[in-house]
Image (cartoon, rainbow, N blue to C red):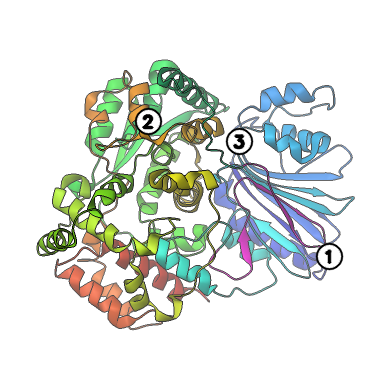
Amino acid sequence: MCGFFFLYNPTANDSLLLERSKAALQRLRHRGPDDEGLTGGTNWRMGHRRLSIIDLSNSKQPMSDPGRRFWLAYNGETYNYKELRQSLLPHWQFRTNGDTEVILAGLIHFGEDFIQRMEGMWAFSLWDNEKKTLLLSRDRIGKKPLYYQTDDRGLCCASELPALSCISDTSREEDLDSTADYLRYGYYLPGKTAYKNVCEVLPGHNIRWTPGKTIREKQYWKLNIANTVPKDKRASMDLLRGHLSEAVKKRLTADVEVGAFLSGGIDSSLIVAILSEELKVKPKTFTIGFDDDSHDEREYARVTANLFQTDHKERCLHEWDRDLLKKLLFEHVGQPFYDSSLLPTAMVSQLASESVKVALSGDGGDELFSGYQRYQAQALLRLYTRMPDFARTGLKKLVRSIPEPFSHHSRSVLKKAHLFLNAVDRQEAERPYIAPVLYSSDNFKELSPELANKGHTPPPLPESCHSDDILEMMVADALVYLPQDILLKVDRASMAYSLETRAPFLDHKVIELAFSLPVNWHRNWFGGKKLLRATFADLLPKTIWKRRKQGFAVPVNRWLRNELVPEMKQMLCGELGFLNKEFIERLLSEHIERGRDHGYRLWNIFVYLLWLQETAI
């Protein structure tokens, strides 16, 4: 795992190019503390920071072909590089033993078509110094980041936004369409950032650029949800077991020790079970907990750790850490980011980095196998909308008359009832479904009348997913929520501590298999992950399979009734952009008085104001 940048600027002299290059490399140091490389020529520079995982003493980057025409900077891991290397032996004399040279050789010999053969996670830039052409690429599901900015003078790209700002000519300007998206969803839509004219390479896409010409973007992978596998459930379960077990095995490819995150939930527990039972690996495992019992999963993580006799380590997030949030937002993410589990993800990454360089995670299991509670809520919504008006009105009044609990929803039926009614209120704002929204349409207009009609056009979903509302949600979550929230969070939080994370569920064969199966194999009226549970029932105890879905939740609702209140009130006296102060004060008052739990909405606003008031935007 690494970080890199590329810069082409015909108006900058060598001294300025070097100055900017050094600044960008320093910004990316956390992504690759083991080595640094910088190269360039007339008008261009390419830099790389390396976290050595494979071929530790060689495979230095940027890497060139023997004729020094092509230069590659690469971030990620290609798990099938040894097989690819064998296919390239007739065409290439290899000098190293890692995956970087395999990618370089494959791209030179086969062109962009070679990317289809790669299995793994990546972002890379390939510069052809003879034809003055740049190729950028990002892996299928968006595990690895790559941002870019172009103007009439040139182009620059980097693994993270703070590094990109070091090599850009232009000052940044807030994109109000993106701000509207952030306030609705808590993150930015694919391809977009908080800033005008600063973009990200889309997952599953390549970009070609030549000075003086427009960017050419090409999609090399798309999610196919056609039913192409055997309709026999047993045969499909066998396929799933084989694909996921093989995906875990591939992600052990490393010349360093590989550990695993262990939250206590089904997905991370299953990865540890496959490691231990099927691959006979006893990994080091890592978990984070909270003082708040309703958010703490350490008890369940210990069950799995004890069962498989892992070398288990845990740590507790005792209190709100403002300095950590600012460090992550300003030095790593580089824009507002709402998901509060960024904080414990960083803490568990720090813990893991003290013992290993690579950790496996359970990311992707909920999107692929219908694990989220919102899918269950959608199934209930079908029944709710068929009820007579008087029954719906009466039910809503009854639930709303009882103060909303502040415990986690996994511990409270009443909390789930309040959350369900919140989903009812948001129906209009979530159609067509792109991602869960934080506000109903009316509430969003109150929050910011000026932004109510703003927002970028969401990316289109595959036509075939619209036949079923829950399938539509699963596909949208896999293509929008997963890369824009979950994968961004894990990448920035883990790389802040020079830790590489790998997600076996996000092997493209597992993804394609999961979405080729009927939705009713994944979910019924009582819950989701049915096929996953049936396939791997023998690997985990019932205490793990039967526990309520919890997720990696953070007690922000408690923080925003206690230690964060003074700072939130102080922020409301400062720059608010286009936000309505009176509406926010009303949310805060209702929250503090325990009438309604507005914790996540207030956290969304808090993070935005922190960014707005403490950056140069």
Q: CA distance from mark 1 to mark 2?
A: 52 Å
Picture quarter with the N terminus:
top right
Mark 3 vs mark 1: which is more N-terminal? 3
Location of residue 560 with respect to 477 vertically, above or below: below
Tell me which segment is drawn in magenta: 193-221
Q: Residue at x 41, y 61 (%)?
A: 186
Q: CA distance from mark 2 to mark 3?
A: 32 Å
Judging by the rendered image, the residue that carries numbered circle 1 is 212
The residue depicted at 36 percent of the width and 64 percent of the height is 428
How far across and how far down the image is residue 196, in percent? 60, 71
Inspect the magenta stretch and tell me whether residue 211 lies in it: yes
Q: Amino acid at mark 3?
A: Glu
Q: Which-is-in-front pick, marks 1 and 2?
A: 2
Mark 2 vs mark 3: which is more N-terminal? 3
Q: Residue at x 54, y 44 (%)?
A: 143
Mark 3 or 1, closer to the camera: 1
**In this image, 559 relative to 488: left or right?**
left
Judging depth in this view, the residue of 605 and 387 nearest the camera is 387
